[in-house]
Amino acid sequence: MLGMERVFFSLAALAVLAAAATNEPVSKYIVYLGHTGSSKPEAVTSSHHQILASVKGSKESSLVHSYKHGFNGFSAFLTEAEADSIAKLPGVVKVFRSKKLSLHTTRSWDFLDSFSGGPHIQLNSSSGSDVIVGVLDTGVWPESKSFDDAGMGPVPKRWKGVCDNSKVTNHSHTIHCNKKIVGARSYGHSDVGSRYQNARDEEGHGTHTASTIAGSLVKDATFLTTLGKGVARGGHPSARLAIYRVCTPECEVDSILAAFDDAIHDGVDILSLSLGEDTTGYDGDSISIGAFHAMQKGIFVSCSAGNGGPGFQTIENSAPWILTVGASTIDRKFSVDIKLGNSKTIQGIAMNPRRTDISTLILGGDASSRSDRIGQARLCAGRFLDGKKVKGKIVLCKYSRGVASSSVIQRHLKELGASGVILGIHNTTEAASFLDLAGAAVTGSALDEINAYLKNSRNTTATISPAHTIIQTTPAPIIADFSSRGPGITDGILKPDLVAPGVDILAAWSPEQPINSYGKPMYTDFNIISGTSMSCPHASAAAAFVKSRHPSWSPAAIKSALMTTARFLDNTKSPIKDHNGEEASPFVMGAGQIDPVAALSPGLVYDISPDEYTKFLCTMNYTRDQLELMTGKNLSCAPLDSYLDLNYPSIAVPIAQFGGPNSTKAVVNRKVTNVGAGKSVYNISVEAPAGVTVAVFPPQLRFKSVFQVLSFQIQFTVDSSKFPQTALWGYGTLTWKSEKHSVRSVFILGLN
Ligand SMILES: *[C@@H]1O[C@H](CO)[C@@H](O)[C@H](O)[C@H]1NC(C)=O
Ligand SMILES: *[C@@H]1O[C@H](CO)[C@@H](O)[C@H](O)[C@H]1NC(C)=O
Ligand SMILES: *[C@@H]1O[C@H](CO)[C@@H](O)[C@H](O)[C@H]1NC(C)=O
Ligand SMILES: *[C@@H]1O[C@H](CO)[C@@H](O)[C@H](O)[C@H]1NC(C)=O
Ligand SMILES: *[C@@H]1O[C@H](CO)[C@@H](O)[C@H](O)[C@H]1NC(C)=O
Ligand SMILES: *[C@@H]1O[C@H](CO)[C@@H](O)[C@H](O)[C@H]1NC(C)=O
Ligand SMILES: *[C@@H]1O[C@H](CO)[C@@H](O)[C@H](O)[C@H]1NC(C)=O
Ligand SMILES: *[C@@H]1O[C@H](CO)[C@@H](O)[C@H](O)[C@H]1NC(C)=O
């Protein structure tokens, strides 16, 4: 009864719809019809035309995209009345308005700490050329050296994707796919003014994420000729890339769904999406729907967690079948020497290519143009600085998150003729690179030292030098303050899943996108930018790496391998810290920072079949009929607390929510699959917060063969008198240990 039949409607119903058509304003809607069943793609599309022609009462079709491979649905211009009528038809899961999503890159240069490509992701490039990673982004600059295919073998025969140049009118814009870029499609470019009618990237973002995943080795890649000189390489240089340009430049939901549909058809193994939306549920969330159907077809989907931090509950892309990736720093910094007139040298941080002569050093507050605006002058708000007082000088500005970006401050000071700037970092880890003015960001004791010098000396001076790169800085990693935090939509699923490098990442760039926002445009082939947009492709590369070694592993098994082997200690052997110096909780970093090489050999995995995920759909606001349409299966939804048993590699138990207000106990079931040595023995090891007792049955797992599955039960008992009244959550870990492996799961308990 599913499949073809359900998309053909009775004529009576269609007649009613036609009558509803008027001259009302139209907007773009997504009509989601669930799975495709066994229908042929052409039949599915013709059913879409049929629904539309009838509702519109005319032959003129307003169909924009027809989704027919991975799932069933379409996008079209409809009036609200038409959308409402379609939503009521049998066979329709959901009708929702298309909208624009955002790329998860922060202001490009407003960060400090480190840049990547470094030792954390030294992947093995000698194998795995059969893995194809689809990137949904702003496209690609195919001529970048990062996409050179020298030495790569032929494209896998199973690949069905294309290099679509059909709309290109200027032949110099044509994308020539090669053995590295095996497909390039583009969507929605008729909407907004886009220079290119194919997947060519005029933004830079897509080129950056794609080269972070699978860029070939490029020697002597630099940013602004002086900085970050070194080898640029993707996380998995032998993987192939399939480019889906969904942001042209805006990232419309209907384009994203069309790309999912094509990517499922084309045969990608991994999908990487560095974009997202705020949502209140999984169901209206197009990425969650597209990823669900991709997961059903065995495709691993990795998404950025969003840049909404450091506030809690800011996470995006948190469906359980998605890998949700937060951002951390690595151990490289651009260090700037600031020599004070008292001969002391202070270390600042910036991607600063410039130097100053010895110059007078003043406080922004002392250069105020109005005595009643000293506060604003301290922040170097341009209007309140007296040009005569700052000309030729280095100005120390108080730098606060969310007040003015460093590029705005630079512009003001440059316009007023200052020779340099020092940003005194106030309440943020964000700093800046400096493009047009010499400068650096300074924090902590270094800032105290400059302030003391200014206070105690007359005729203060300073000299700023160009940055040099220092490596093996400690502590690293730390979690970026912008990285979005959990909890996610469902309290029973802990998000984010893990973190990966996302601060000051060097990768390929579109030569058409200037890297400065004012003054004479500056162009570069490589750029350093930050965001969970940059951490997601690192995790996608790690997933591709695991997939290339273990082609038969399911998306859930790969996710489990990445999570249970993640690092939770920094390079000083202390627990990884948040941006504010506090220990990073699982809501901040999930399981920890990815360790791609460790993930190749996890010992045990927590696997989840598509059917087990399907049951999770019951937690969403769907009717039984809708669920049947989405999955093609009859679901019997179990009680809510059974979702705790989704075989996730981390555990989140909001005890009060599932057990009632005074509940003190929760029982969670899990099972692990042996992917290590055939004969192996694992013992449980638990770290629990005060007031929580964790019992695991059995406490030892004895495996006799590879791929054997063993189940266990975890009993949490809470003594609420033993933790502070204010504690909402308790954190701990549960680790299966054998002689060779440590399979670590983090858990969170909701206490109140
Ligand atoms: C990389 O691949 C080679 C050849 O397959 C292998 O000998 C080596 O152990 C691999 N290195 C890692 C870190 O997996
Ligand atoms: C074709 O594109 C190139 C490169 O963008 C440009 O220089 C040229 O002017 C274009 N030609 C036409 C006819 O638009
Ligand atoms: C930082 O401080 C400024 C003013 O001192 C304030 O406006 C801003 O909201 C603060 N930002 C954060 C993230 O606390
Ligand atoms: C201030 O410092 C400059 C540079 O070191 C020096 O040339 C000048 O004489 C000093 N002025 C006073 C009043 O000390
Ligand atoms: C669930 O769906 C119904 C019907 O579509 C709607 O009225 C209700 O507001 C939804 N509830 C939530 C929590 O989304
Ligand atoms: C679902 O159950 C109904 C009634 O038992 C049956 O007619 C239908 O074929 C089932 N659908 C599937 C996909 O199994
Ligand atoms: C929970 O415990 C509180 C205090 O002990 C008591 O007042 C309340 O009635 C209990 N609620 C339930 C549902 O048992
Ligand atoms: C597991 O526990 C048993 C008995 O407690 C012990 O003999 C064995 O060495 C342990 N194995 C590991 C890998 O810790």
Image (tube, rainbow, N blue to C red):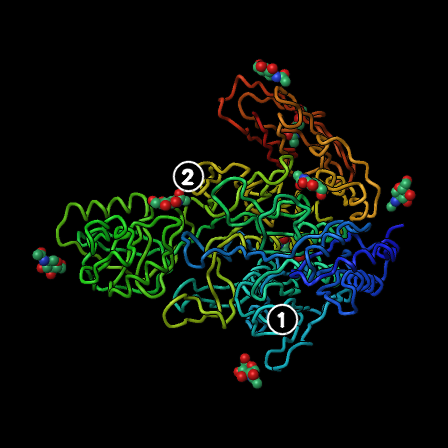
Placement of 447 over or under 644, stated as above or below? below
Q: Point out the frontmost of discs 2 and 1.
A: 1
Mark found first going from the N terminus, 2 or 1: 1
Which of 599 and 483 lies nearest the eye of the viewer? 483
- The percent coordinates of residue 536 (x first, y second) are 57, 53
Placement of 151 over or under 386, stated as above or below? below
Q: Residues within 10 Å of mark 1 (few under 14, many from 20)?
A: few
Q: Residue at x 69, y 73 (%)?
A: 164
Identify the residue under disc 2: 581
Residue 730 circle label = none
Q: Is mark 2 within 8 Å of ligand 3?
A: no
Q: The disc labelled 2 sits on which kind of residue?
A: Gly
Q: Residue at x 28, y 46 (%)?
A: 447
Q: CA distance from mark 2 to mark 1?
A: 47 Å
Q: Secondary structure at mark 2?
A: loop
Q: The disc labelled 1 sits on which kind of residue?
A: Ser
Tell me if residue 465 can be seen.
yes
- The percent coordinates of residue 452 (x first, y second) are 20, 44
Which of 397 and 254 lies nearest the eye of the viewer? 254
Which of 649 and 23 lies nearest the eye of the viewer? 23
Q: Quadrant of residue 656?
A: top right
635 vs 481, left or right, is right
Q: Quadrant of the C terminus?
A: top right
- The percent coordinates of residue 444 (x first, y second) are 32, 43
155 vs 376, left or right, is right
Placement of 594 over or under 738, stated as above or below? below
Identify the residue under disc 1: 190
Q: Secondary structure at mark 1?
A: loop
Tell me if residue 129 can be seen.
no
- The percent coordinates of residue 210 (x first, y second) are 59, 62
Name the quadrant where ligand 3 sits: top left
